[in-house]
């Protein structure tokens, strides 16, 4: 796949970076050696090697897998189709859907202004997300 004129990135590179960024935002570390890539592969119906190639920006997954990928990284599947270059931004107008709530967004939405309480709440949420993701990688 050829790089686009605007970004000099290939669609596969944009796609891999987007998935890694979205996963990171929800506390899912897809770095090599964490075990999360294997779990991600199982949950999306991809092979471990396909997940690795996708995250490294070497290949795009099959479009039939976009929906399960979007579910795992909690994004609109439209964003994956746009990143892959399958559709343009204008081909599928973005809906006014609420975005995934971040720890920062939670304290903002709750109107918490005290810096110490904000820090404690955000840290607690981030810890809970990490613990949940670590528990998901443990063998059953």
Image (cartoon, helix red, strand yellow):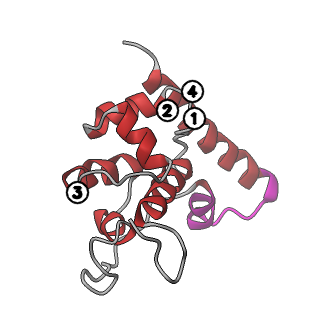
Judging by the rendered image, the residue that carries numbered circle 1 is 130
- The outermost residue toward the right is 116
Q: Secondary structure at mark 2?
A: helix
Disc 4 + disc 3, Cβ < 8 Å: no
Q: CA distance from mark 1 to mark 2?
A: 5 Å
Q: Position of residue 49 (x, y in %)?
A: 39, 34
Give the foreground label among 2 and 3: 3
Q: Which residues are magenta?
A: 104-116
The residue that disc 3 covers is 63
Query: Pointer 4: what residue?
Result: 33
Q: Is residue 96 magenta?
A: no
Q: Position of residue 4 (x, y in %)?
A: 46, 77
Q: Residue at position x 54%, y 74% from top?
A: 8
C-alpha span from label 4 to label 1: 15 Å
Mark 3 nearby-residue class (10 Å; few <14, some 14–19, many ≥20): some
Residue 71 image offset from top left, x and y in percent: 31, 50
Q: How many marks?
A: 4
Q: Nearer the viewer, mark 4 or mark 1?
A: 4
> Could you tell me how far apart the alpha carbons at marks 2 and 4 are, in whole angstroms?
14 Å
Q: Which residue is mark 2?
A: 133
> Would you say 25 lies left or right of 49 here?
right
Could you tell me if the residues under marks 4 and 1 are in contact, i.e. CB atoms within 8 Å?
A: no
Question: Is there CB contact under 8 Å for labels 2 and 3?
Answer: no
Q: Is residue 114 above or below residue 93?
A: above
N-terminal label among 2 and 3: 3
Of the numbered discs 4 and 3, the one sitting upstream in the chain is 4
- Tags 1 and 2 touching, CB below 8 Å: yes
Q: Secondary structure at mark 3?
A: helix
Neighbour tally class for label 1: few under 14, some 14-19, many 20 plus, Cα within 10 Å: some
Which callout, 2 or 4, points to the residue nearer the camera?
4
């Amino acid at each position: 796949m050829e790089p686009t004129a605007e970004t000099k990135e290939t669609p596969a590179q944009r796609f891999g970076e987007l998935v890694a960024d979205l996963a990171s935002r929800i506390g899912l570390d897809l770095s090599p050696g964490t075990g999360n890539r294997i779990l991600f592969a199982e949950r999306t119906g991809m092979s471990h090697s396909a997940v690795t190639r996708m995250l490294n920006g070497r290949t795009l997954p099959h479009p039939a897998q976009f929906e399960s990928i979007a579910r795992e990284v909690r994004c609109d599947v439209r964003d994956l189709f746009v990143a892959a270059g399958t559709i343009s931004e204008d081909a599928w107008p973005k809906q006014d859907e609420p975005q995934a709530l971040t720890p920062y967004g939670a304290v903002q939405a709750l109107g918490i202004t005290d810096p110490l309480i904000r820090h404690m709440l955000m840290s607690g949420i981030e810890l809970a997300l990490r613990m949940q993701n670590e528990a998901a990688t443990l063998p059953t």
